[in-house]
Image: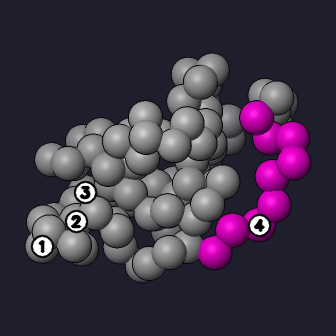
Amino acid sequence: MNKCKHFAGLEKVEPMDKGCVGCLKTGDEWLHLRLCLSCGYVGCCDNSKNKHATKHFKKTEHPLIKSFEPGEVWIWCYEDEKIFD
């Protein structure tokens, strides 16, 4: 996997929850989950009503997320708008 500069210095993170942190607080539902590789925030995808993963990036500027779905192994870089699989 070719990596962007945002992979430098990443360490393993523990997920904050088993579901979307934002949706769990409001009682909403999500479609797919994404894990922030900087802090472990679990957010819902852009096909979900609340788009918490993208909102988390815009708030924190943490650039890398990975799918938190079973069997999916890709990583997305918001800053470079590139997927790594």
State the mark number for residue 27. Answer: 1
Labelled pair 3, 2 in contact (Cβ < 8 Å): no
Labelled pair 3, 1 in contact (Cβ < 8 Å): no
- Local packing at callout 2 (Cα closer than 10 Å; few below 14, some 14-19, many 20+) is some
Q: Identify the residue under disc 2.
A: 23
Residue segment shown in magenta: 6-14
Does the magenta-highlighted stretch encompass residue 77?
Answer: no
Task: From this view, report whether residue 63 is shown above or below residue 36.
Answer: above
Q: Identify the residue under disc 4.
A: 12
Labelled pair 4, 3 in contact (Cβ < 8 Å): no
- Local packing at callout 4 (Cα closer than 10 Å; few below 14, some 14-19, many 20+) is few
Labelled pair 2, 1 in contact (Cβ < 8 Å): yes
Q: Identify the residue under disc 3.
A: 31
Of marks 4 and 3, which one's residue comes earlier in the chain? 4
| Furthest-right residue in this view | 9
What's under tag 2, amino acid-wise?
Cys
Gap between marks 4 and 2 measured at Cα? 24 Å
Q: Judging from the image, what secondary structure is the residue with disc 1 in? A: loop
Q: Nearer the viewer, residue 42 or 58?
A: 58
* Count of marks, rendered view: 4
Labelled pair 1, 4 in contact (Cβ < 8 Å): no
Q: Quadrant of the C terminus?
A: top right
Query: Residue 9, image x and y in percent?
Result: 87, 48
Gap between marks 3 and 1 measured at Cα? 14 Å
Is residue 71 visible to us here?
Answer: no
Q: Judging from the image, what secondary structure is the residue with disc 4 in? A: loop
Gap between marks 3 and 2 measured at Cα? 11 Å
Position of 71 compared to 24: left or right? Answer: right
Query: Residue 31, image x and y in percent?
Result: 25, 57
